[in-house]
Amino acid sequence: MKNWFIILFLLISLQGMAQEKIAITEEDYNNSKIEMADVMRSEGKIYVLVGVIGIVFAGILVYIINTDRKVSSLEKLLKEEN
């Protein structure tokens, strides 16, 4: 049964299509304007975005440090039992 599901999902995934290829022009190479960043910077929202990204990374870092401490204490307990 599991193999049938795998085959079914593989056949379904073959039906998926990627985006159509768009030709790159000379204008694309010369374009140095980033509209979204310019608009966000002019409205002051870019600092909010940077702050949110910083908070998310800080949260991930705190989670990793706490997990490492817990694993270290468990490893220490295992060494003491042996």
Image: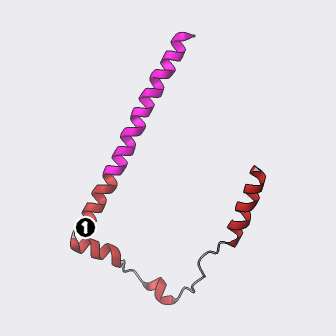
The amino acid beneath tag 1 is Lys
35 or 4: nearer the viewer: 4
- Residue visible at 65% across and 72% down? 16
The quadrant holding residue 21 is bottom right
- Residue visible at 25% across and 67% down? 45
- Horizontally, residue 29 falls left or right of residue 10, namely left
Q: Which residues are magenta?
A: 55-82
> x, y (%) of residue 54?
32, 52
Q: Is residue 74 above or below residue 53?
A: above
The quadrant holding residue 24 is bottom right
Magenta stretch holds residue 57: yes
Q: Which residue is mark 1?
A: 45
The crowd level at tag 1 (other Cα within 10 Å; few <14, some 14-19, many 20+) is few
- Horizontally, residue 66 falls left or right of residue 38, namely right
If the image is split into quadrants, where does the C terminus sit? top right
SS assignment for the magenta stretch, majority: helix
49 or 38: nearer the viewer: 49
The quadrant holding residue 23 is bottom right
Can you name the residue that lies furthest to the bottom here?
Answer: 26
Magenta stretch holds residue 6: no
Q: Is residue 9 above or below residue 27?
A: above
61 or 6: nearer the viewer: 6
> x, y (%) of residue 15?
69, 72
> x, y (%) of residue 50?
30, 59
6 or 46: nearer the viewer: 6
Q: Is residue 80 above or below residue 65?
A: above
Tell how many labels: 1
Secondary structure under tag 1 reads helix
> x, y (%) of residue 64?
42, 38
